[in-house]
Image (cartoon, rainbow, N blue to C red):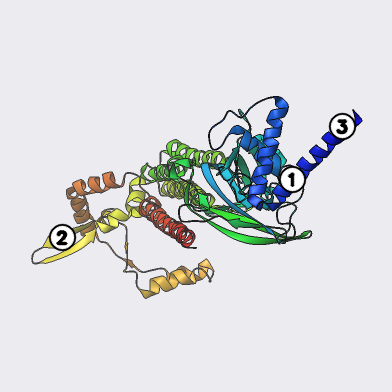
Amino acid sequence: MFAVLKSMRTVIFCFVTILAFSCAMAPNGQRTDTNIRNRASLRRKQKGEERTCTRKVCPEDITETMDTFLLNYDNRIRPGFNEGPTKVYSYFYVTGFGPASEQDMEYTMDMFFRQKWRDDRLAFKDMNKNITELKLNNKMVQMLWTPDSFFRNGKKSIAHNITVPNRLLRIDPEGNILYTMRLTIKAKCPMILIDFPMDVHTCHLVYGSYGYTKDQVQFIWYEDNDTQPVDVPQSSSRLNQFELINYTWKSDVIFTVSGEYSVLETKFHLKRQMGYYVIQTYVPCVLIVILSQISFWINKEAVPARTVSGIMTVLNLTTLSISTRQSLPKVAYATALDWYMAVCFAFCFAALIEFASVHYFHLQVEKSSQKDDSSEANMFHYCAAFRKRLIEIRRGEGHMKVNLRDLFKMASGMQLDRKKDFEYYLRRLAGFILPRHWLSEMSPRKMDVNASDVKLAQKLLDAAEDQINEVTRSQGGVNRIDRVSRVAFPLAFFFFNGIYWFVYLSHQAHEVAHRLNP
């Protein structure tokens, strides 16, 4: 019995020796394939199964391939540890861009984040030449080394896990790995709102390795003939207030205390769409200013109407300004909209001050008329239209022109002032310097009016009654300040709008052109 066991041991030893010798004499690829087939055959024999798959690539082949390259694989060590930095090629496809918030100064973006790198430890071209690519699920990711990418200016990042983790992993025979994730990124976007709402902003997205310096991991944009590193389709933009006018990308190096890191940076250039603010703010401001200027056409004696009109326009503009400011961050500088509303507020307040001035001078005139006890004389004296309305008097071959105010003075037996020449204006100028009693002798000389002139003037006034009534109706209590304001205020507001829109729209066009052609 002992001799039989010894002979069987000798036969087994010889068989193993011959098998090892044949494997050593075979080429590397053939030896690897043979080993895999032998292990697969051994596993099937252990399970008591026979190979039933007749295709080139069977599930057993994929299982054996993965088991083989994961046998001595250490996912704690990066690929090419002794061969220089690991090159990670990156690109992403944006499925949804927006919204962007100036209140929180941030923007949100959904994307497919893709990375490519090579790990020679996972190459299986010598194991099974029939397998062209391994398409694996998310569970395999935990077993492999992956770049520790993170978004440097990100505030919150979400990796989607419904219904399963949204990850894609593919490995080709050369060991090239494609790793894709679906992410939602909320990143910081500092905004300068000086030109608001005609502002243009640039939002950055910067990402790289968290722990590996540029000597260990190098990030590179992936570019080929059919693919660009950053792809943002027009249908993916979900921006209500902004328009994505352009986006650019570049590679960069960031210097920190812990070392130099390779990063990739994308710039998204946004232009605000100001239609909402035109409808909700600018048009109401213009209408309120126009409403405040309508009071110039109301009779100066309608004090309640003009007072209410002025106060209501000021209050409405103040309320509109407060409501508009609530949607903006509390910045320490004035925006373009603030300047516009401030000027509109100044126009409304000036209209209210204008009525106060008109009312004050009207009271002064009434006091003077009470002293003279003649409202009609006061009307002829202060109304400029009576000085401008001339009546032509003909007597024989001679004729002369006299205004209604002088005609009224003649009919009342009042003396007429002589023509206001250089002496008159010199006296007015001296009135600001010299005491009033020194100027008593400098008063203008009067023109005497005789009885015949008085009778003639009274007849002419009776004949010119229609013209007097016409002038009275046309004036209707209109003050000279109101007449000037009717023209000056609208012209000033028109010129302000022209300058305002020209300056800010030109600046916006310049900023857009600069970002379209960086």
Q: Are marks 1 and 2 in contact (CB under 8 Å)?
A: no
Marking on residue 251:
none
63 or 364: nearer the viewer: 63
Earlier sequence position, callout 2 versus callout 3? 3
Q: Position of residue 9 (x, y in %)?
A: 84, 36
Give the Cα distance between marks 1 and 2: 148 Å
260 or 392: nearer the viewer: 260
Q: Position of residue 411 (x, y in %)?
A: 26, 54
| In front: label 1 or label 2 | 1
| Mark 2 lies on residue | 393
Q: Are marks 2 and 3 in contact (CB under 8 Å)?
A: no
- Is there any visible trace of residue 409 in the rendered image? no
Give the Cα distance between marks 1 and 3: 20 Å
Amino acid type assigned to the residue bearing label 2 in the image: Ile
Q: Residues within 10 Å of mark 1 (few under 14, many from 20)?
A: few
Residue under the image location 60 percent in, 33 percent down? 59
Q: Secondary structure at mark 3?
A: helix
| Mark 3 lies on residue | 5
Above or below residue 66? Residue 371 is: below
Residue under the image location 69 percent in, 50 percent down? 121
Earlier sequence position, callout 1 versus callout 2? 1
Q: Are marks 1 and 3 in contact (CB under 8 Å)?
A: no
| Quadrant hosting residue 156 | top right
Q: Position of residue 174 (x, y in %)?
A: 60, 51
In the image, 448: left or right of 85?
left
Q: Residues within 10 Å of mark 3 (few under 14, many from 20)?
A: few
Above or below residue 281? Residue 199 is: below
Q: For the N terminus, give its image quadrant.
A: top right
- Is there any visible trace of residue 482 in the rendered image? yes
Marking on residue 18:
1
Q: Secondary structure at mark 1?
A: helix
| Quadrant hosting residue 3 | top right
